[in-house]
Amino acid sequence: MNDPDTQKIRQQMGATMKRLLTLTAASALTLSATAQAQEDPIVRDAEYYILEKQHGERWTAEDQEIDAVMADFREQNGGNPPNILYVLLDDVGFGDMGNPTMNAVRGYKTPAVNELATEGMRLARMYTEPSCTPTRVAFMTGRHPIRNGMGNTAVDISGFGLADKEVTLAEVLSDAGYNTVHIGKWHLGDIREAWPNFQGFDYAAFPIHQQGQLTLYHDDGANEEITIGIGENNYDSRHTKDNWFRSDASAMATGVEGVRDTNVREVHMEPGERWTEQKYHEMNLRYQDQAMEQLRELAAKDEPFFLNYWPLYPIVGPRTTTAEYTTPNGGTYVEKMKLVDQWIGDLMAEMDTLGIADDTIVIVMGDNGHATKFSPESGFTPMLYRGGKGATLEGGVRVDAFVRWPGMIEANSIVNDITHVSDLFTTLARIGGGTGGIPRDRVIDGVDQTSLLLNGDTHGRRDYVFLYAINALEAVVKEQYKLAIPGGSIDNAILADFYDLYRDPQEKYPVSTEIGAWGGAKFVRMIQRHVQRKEQYPDEGPGLGRPYEGIENLRPESEAAVAEFLFMVQTPEK
């Protein structure tokens, strides 16, 4: 956002912005009742203060009522806040689960998630980041990934990850008395400090990388030409000079397990063994079994728990482990989606058996839109919204999201307030009694949406969202209106592409004067407030380190792969 056009706008608005920042600083002194109880207020993005200035008194009254409701819950729950089970599904777009009618449109069924949605609340306007890693960072830290250098998605060995200085939801809840466990995909870096057991989880079982390695570019993926040019069966290596150009998925670290602040061990992979689609399938089965096992163990303890379960399925490459197609849809991903739905049903049934359903918040949602490059054979394509994974179009960042908390959240309810995945950090910290553990030395983008969950539609505290593609601010949503910023640059806000998302969910019919005449300057001021806040609290980079350091039983081929990586990244400097 430092291009000449933006600088010109900033100069023109300088005096106005100074007055605005003065008002912002003043309103920052009147935060919600919960934040006022802390020694220092939570630092927010500028737009939050605009809303708080107008609604702060009502929010304070609501917060006092919420505190009373939460106190009653804890009194009836042996003094404990609720357990939390968070299930994050990969590349599942809006309309792919939770709705029988949409199931019929798509040609498969998700009965378990449909039942969960009926028993709880549907967040109709849940926004995420455009891809896997940034969404997961936003959930874990309550911060846009642009702020900590984690806006991109790495597939290969990379040497970076979530920095140790970031404060995660697991750390906040752990300090508040929760037992914490992570099972499944992590994808926040291949360096030690970034792993879940070094980011607040008491126990973690997870793959170091993600499905690019695990189901796409291994030997089976090459043989089926899910990927091209990595196996002797689909490319001729006679003219290959650079033997390091192609990464070997079997040489990369795979699944590891470990306890808090202790080195991990790679499991189910021996030196010299090849990674296969069958091993990927077994990994998925193992994570479901571990999620069930951990649920039982956590339920048996006196303390509340936070179980973070991020399945790798439904993403699948080769058909090796798909014996038959059982739906009218017939897509490869859809077969695994059907399996994941069954797994979620098993978890819900086990919670009933354990007698903890009423004491547990369950959240099930997607992390971003479909990987449309695999459409339509995956069985998934965008439906209501256009675009998919990697895009800031609604199809890339709008997902299904359902929250169930029996007796506390109204069953079969729908809210149309805007929510962002970062809001779950702040909201769950509040519900878990951990607001005091939220850091005060950095901007927290997540908004406390407890009132929305407990009071229902129109009680949200956000009507905006900033949408980044890695480092570029590509869109801003305010109410039902969206400003597209291709490449992060605005030539003329009045003539820019605005969309009315109610009238045009596919973002095919931009309007300029109709919205820009009254809203253009307002949107530009939103962006300027956001940019100036970033200047007060500058973005930082990710954590850096030696890949795989901290794996006790690192295989020789993995050590060689790291050595190759380190040599190649240093070569340009010599």
Image (cartoon, rainbow, N blue to C red):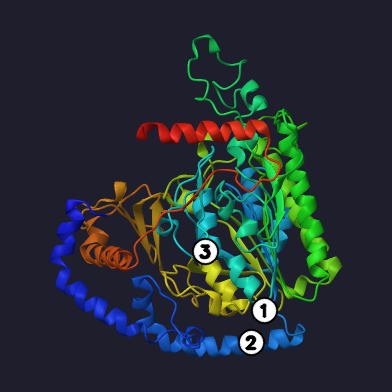
SS assignment at label 3? helix
Q: Which mark is residue 69?
A: 2
SS assignment at label 2? helix
Q: Nearer the viewer, mark 2 or mark 3?
A: 3
Q: Is residue 140 positioned above or below 249 on the image?
A: below
Quarter occupied by the N terminus: bottom left
Q: Is residue 554 positioned above or below 61 on the image?
A: above
Q: In the visual, does 369 lie left or right of 275? A: left
Mark earlier in primary sequence (3, 1): 3
Real-space CA distance between mark 2 and mark 3, rounded to the nearest whole angstrom: 26 Å
Circles 3 and 1: CB atoms closer than 8 Å: no
Q: Amino acid at mark 2?
A: Val
**Quarter-wise, where is residue 16 in the image?**
bottom left
Q: Amino acid at mark 1?
A: Met
Q: Position of residue 403 (x, y in %)?
A: 63, 67
Q: Amino acid at mark 3?
A: Thr
Along the line of sight, the residue nearer the viewer: 551 or 422: 551
Q: Which residue is mark 3?
A: 141
Q: Which residue is mark 1?
A: 408
